[in-house]
Amino acid sequence: MDKLNFFEEIRKDAEETYKLNPEDADNLMRWGEALLELSQFQNVIDSLKMIQDAISKLEDAILIDPMKHDAVWCLGNAYTSYARLTPDDTQARLNFGLAYLFFGIAVAQQPDNQVYHKSLEMADKAPQLHTGFHKNRLLSLLGGVETLAIPSPKVVKNKKSSDEKYIVMGWVILAIGVVACISFRKLR
């Protein structure tokens, strides 16, 4: 429970700091990260609520500083966490898609960060793994039926394209569009 107390303290500190300075992107990111970590200690329903709150904090951080690549990457993690807990395949795929989008933006902002690249690669495989997991879970709940094998992930080769600058620019343009959409949603 030491980890739980640690992240709870971070959450409380971030909440207090927010009252003093709601425009502090670093604090909002810290708050979102703490909520994401704390969500692991909750039941599924409370965890989903906490992840939604984390997503909101991380979106706010990105609105303040759109080039804050670590907040963008963390937002991808939040959408991945939300998708993993979602049994509805369509909704899960939507959230995995958002995770993939934000991991891609993080890669575009920090192309040398291997963690971001690995997250993007895993986000591409996540929907298949999610579907396999929930099928296995359903079959096991039905009583003693052998579970299906989860498909093994394909090996993805790391290709360097001569069009890499266009890909990066595409992600940057997409990031601007996402930030604009988030801004519009917050104004409502």
Image (tube, rainbow, N blue to C red):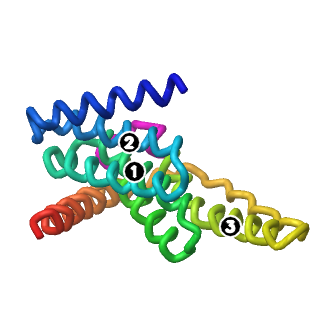
Is 110 within the magenta? yes
- Nearer-the-camera pick, 104 or 99: 99
Q: Quadrant of residue 143?
A: bottom right
Task: Categorize mark 2 by other alpha carbons within 10 Å: few (<14), some (14-19), many (20+).
Answer: many
Residue at the spot of label 1: 50
Are circles 1 and 2 on residues that touch, CB within 8 Å?
yes
Whole-percent x, y for residue 63 in the image:
16, 52
Whole-percent x, y for residue 92 in the image:
51, 68
Give the amino acid at mark 3: His
- Nearer-the-camera pick, 120 or 139: 139
Q: Which mark is residue 35?
A: 2
**Mark 1: secondary structure:** helix
Q: Earlier in the sequence, mark 1 or mark 2?
A: 2
* Residue shown at the point (38%, 42%) measured from the top left: 35
Quadrant showing the N terminus: top right
User: What residue span does the magenta drawing correspond to?
Assistant: 108-117
